[in-house]
């Protein structure tokens, strides 16, 4: 499913196999929305029916642990050890069951619901405020297990609002220089490498604007050094097929490349 979290680089998998890399613990974690990267428009096929093309966006989360002292009941928040960033791809549209809709409705309940999209100017302000915003994420197993029963892969299943009290305890980002929003025309090699193989093929190569995009130049440069990068293998056919998101009733406006990102909102400000 295109909304599943993007979890690993090839080298990270090798480190995991060698026992040098650890997944975050399953369950609820405070997280800081670190960055957003807009991807291309992609038209998925579901049950042999081609759906309308939808813009996608990749959101990168920096993870933290919330720890309570048993004696004093004092709560502290510290960076997760090991894999402390997870990335999730969303369909950028307003839909009753859409993960992006559910996230925004949770973060800004006074200004939108899953049934009611906010006005465009308010919506744009919400998007501009997402990088650096503190949220809660629910991390779940993504299928396979390692020896001993620990999950081999994990993903973010849900993103909801963090309390003001927890948000104030979350440390600043460890990567402040790369925080922000990147439009599709400016996508980098590092951002493409966050994607799973099938997501590279769908949301980059099969995107509506791929042929004339900077993404094509970047991907071709990667494959010049790594010819098999994100190339489909026979074993991929045995994996679960990607499913489209819920039908969008209200498509979201495409970001304007010439428009400055709106000023950030305070963590406790409701737009």
Image: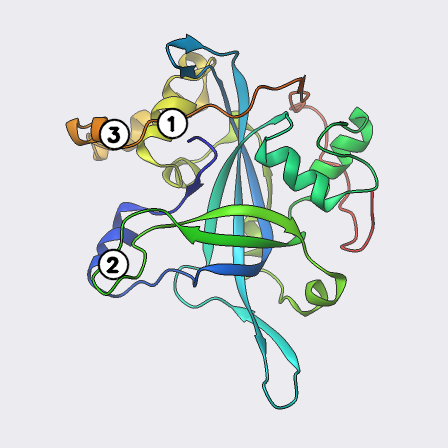
Q: Where's residue 133, x and y in %?
A: 67, 52
Judged from this view, the residue extending furthest toward the bottom is: 71
Instruction: Please identify the quarter of the rendering in which residue 210 is found.
Output: top left
| Mark 3 and mark 2: Cα distance apart in space | 22 Å
- Labels 1 & 3 near each other (Cβ < 8 A): no
Q: Is residue 28 visible?
A: yes
- How many numbered badges does the structure rendering display? 3
* Secondary structure found at label 2: helix
Q: Which residue is mark 3?
A: 223
Question: Vertically, is 47 above or below 7?
Answer: above
**Left of 172 or right of it: where is 185?**
left
Kind of element beneath mark 1: loop
* Location of the C terminus (image quadrant): top right
**What kind of element bears circle 3?**
helix
**268 to the left or right of 218:** right
**Residue 260 got which mark?**
none
Task: Tell me, yes or no, whether the two marked residues, 3 and 2, touch with CB atoms within 8 Å.
Answer: no
Q: Give me the residue at 29% from left, 33% from top.
A: 222
Residue 15: assigned label: 2
- Viewer-side label of 3, 2: 2
Q: Which circle marks residue 242 in the picture?
A: 1
**Placement of the N terminus among the 4 image quadrants:** top left
């Amino acid at each position: 499913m295109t909304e599943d979290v993007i979890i690993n680089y090839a080298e990270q998998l090798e480190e995991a196999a060698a026992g040098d890399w650890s997944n975050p613990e399953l369950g609820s974690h405070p997280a800081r929305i670190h960055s957003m990267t807009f991807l291309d428009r992609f038209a998925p096929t579901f049950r042999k029916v081609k759906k309308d093309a939808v813009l996608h966006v990749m959101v990168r989360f920096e993870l933290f642990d919330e720890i309570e002292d048993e004696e004093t009941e004092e709560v502290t928040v510290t960076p997760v050890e090991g894999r402390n960033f997870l990335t999730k791809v969303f369909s950028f549209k307003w839909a009753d069951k859409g993960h992006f809709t559910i996230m925004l409705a949770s973060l800004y309940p006074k200004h939108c619901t899953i049934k009611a999209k906010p006005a465009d100017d308010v919506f744009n302000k919400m998007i501009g405020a997402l990088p650096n915003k503190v949220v809660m994420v629910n991390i779940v197993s993504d299928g396979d297990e390692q020896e001993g029963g620990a999950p081999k892969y994990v993903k973010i299943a849900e993103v909801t609002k963090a309390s003001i009290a927890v948000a104030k305890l979350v440390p600043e980002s460890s990567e402040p220089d790369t925080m922000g929003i990147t439009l599709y025309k400016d996508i980098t090699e590092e951002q493409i490498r966050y994607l799973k193989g099938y997501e590279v093929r769908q949301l980059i190569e099969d995107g509506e604007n791929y042929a004339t995009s900077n993404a094509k130049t970047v991907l071709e440069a990667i494959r010049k050094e790594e010819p098999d990068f994100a190339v489909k293998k026979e074993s991929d056919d045995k994996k679960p097929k990607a499913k489209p998101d819920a039908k969008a009733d209200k498509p979201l406006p495409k970001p304007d490349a010439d428009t400055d990102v709106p000023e950030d909102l305070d963590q406790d400000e409701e737009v």
